């Protein structure tokens, strides 16, 4: 079965760039049925969606982060990545990657959901 | 952007039915998912497409969605069901929206 694993530095200095990678195993990242996503969770808080990417490279991004966020995909390596620039303490969070099946029900109704999650990686922004 | 609201907490007696609401303007026209998150763990999908259970999720979990409220129902609540539960929708603005989460306590 598909498994996802986040990796990257646990500590990032303020104003630097946060870079994380999600490695996909047990299945191909080249899938016409799935997007791939990053979600984060601030300490003691709820879930915040960051963005999706399709194997073709097309993306949907959270508008509140769009100017700082880049999500990319590396199909030969079966992984996708997140880069968040100019980080501050407010970017301290657990970052999750997940697989995203999607479907269209007609009448303009789409839906996307996260069915397989990585365990998450904690990123602290501090000097 | 679209907003969904959840109560901060819901309590249920052991063995009774729990209902966790997720409110939003005409949320019945959208498709709702639900996730369970236990402390220190990643979220787990428990309901998708309003009322579908992924394989491995007990039949005790069910969902409904109509009007301005979607509801996650858990019958015969167990101590192991204690967790935070999040609703999630895909909005026409092409963004994912999560509810703030509800902490379920089984008394």
Image: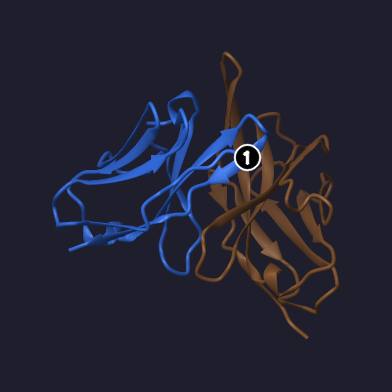
Chain colours: A brown, B blue
Identify the residue shown where x is 40% and y is 42%: B22
Q: In this view, does B85 lie to the left or right of A80?
A: left
Q: Is residue A55 left or right of residue B58?
A: right
Q: Which residue is identified by label 1?
A: B1
Residue A12, how many percent across, how many down?
Answer: 78, 77
Which residue is nearer to you in this view: B95 or B2? B2
Could you say which quadrant of the image residue A56 lies in?
top right
Identify the residue shown where x is 55% and y is 48%: A116
Q: Is residue B55 left or right of residue A34?
A: left
Which residue is nearer to you in this view: A62 or A58? A62
Identify the residue shown where x is 78% and y is 56%: A82
Q: In this view, does B95 lie above or below A5?
A: above
Could you say which quadrant of the image residue A89 lies in?
bottom right
Which residue is nearer to you in this view: A45 or B78? A45
Image quarter where the C terminus of chain A lies is: bottom right
Q: In this view, does A123 lie above or below B73?
A: below
Which residue is nearer to you in this view: A123 or A62? A62
Residue A1, how many percent across, how many down?
Answer: 56, 46
Tell me if mark 1 has few (under 14), some (14-19) or many (20+) residues whose alpha carbon lies within 10 angstroms of its own: few
Q: Is residue A111 above or below residue B84?
A: above
Could you say which quadrant of the image residue A20 lies in?
bottom right
Residue A47, how many percent across, how many down?
Answer: 55, 56
Q: How many marks?
A: 1
Residue A100, how many percent across, how many down?
Answer: 61, 40
Q: In this view, does A67 lie to the left or right of B16?
A: right
Instruction: Report the chain holding disc 1.
Output: B
Q: Tell me the SS state at disc 1.
A: loop
């Amino acid at each position: 079965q598909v498994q996802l694993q986040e990796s990257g530095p646990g500590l990032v200095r303020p104003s630097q760039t946060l870079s994380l990678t999600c490695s996909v195993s047990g299945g191909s990242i080249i899938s016409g049925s799935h997007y791939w996503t990053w979600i984060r969770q601030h300490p003691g808080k709820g879930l915040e969606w960051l963005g999706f990417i399709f194997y073709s490279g097309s993306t949907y991004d959270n508008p509140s982060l769009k100017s700082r966020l880049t999500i990319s995909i590396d199909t030969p390596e079966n992984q996708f990545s997140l880069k968040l620039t100019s980080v501050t303490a407010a970017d301290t969070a657990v970052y999750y990657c997940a697989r995203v099946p999607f479907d269209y029900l007609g009448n303009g109704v789409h839906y996307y959901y996260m069915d397989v999650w990585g365990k998450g990686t904690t990123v602290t922004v501090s000097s | 952007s679209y907003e969904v609201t959840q109560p901060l907490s819901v309590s249920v007696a052991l063995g009774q039915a729990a209902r966790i609401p997720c409110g939003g303007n005409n949320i019945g026209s959208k498709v709702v998912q639900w996730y369970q998150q236990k402390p220190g763990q990643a979220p787990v999908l428990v309901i998708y497409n309003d009322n579908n259970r992924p394989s491995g999720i007990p039949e005790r979990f069910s969902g409904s969605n109509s009007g301005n409220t979607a509801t996650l129902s858990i019958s015969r609540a167990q101590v192991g069901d204690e967790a935070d539960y999040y609703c999630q929708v895909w909005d026409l603005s092409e963004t994912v929206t999560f509810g703030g989460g509800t902490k379920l306590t089984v008394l």
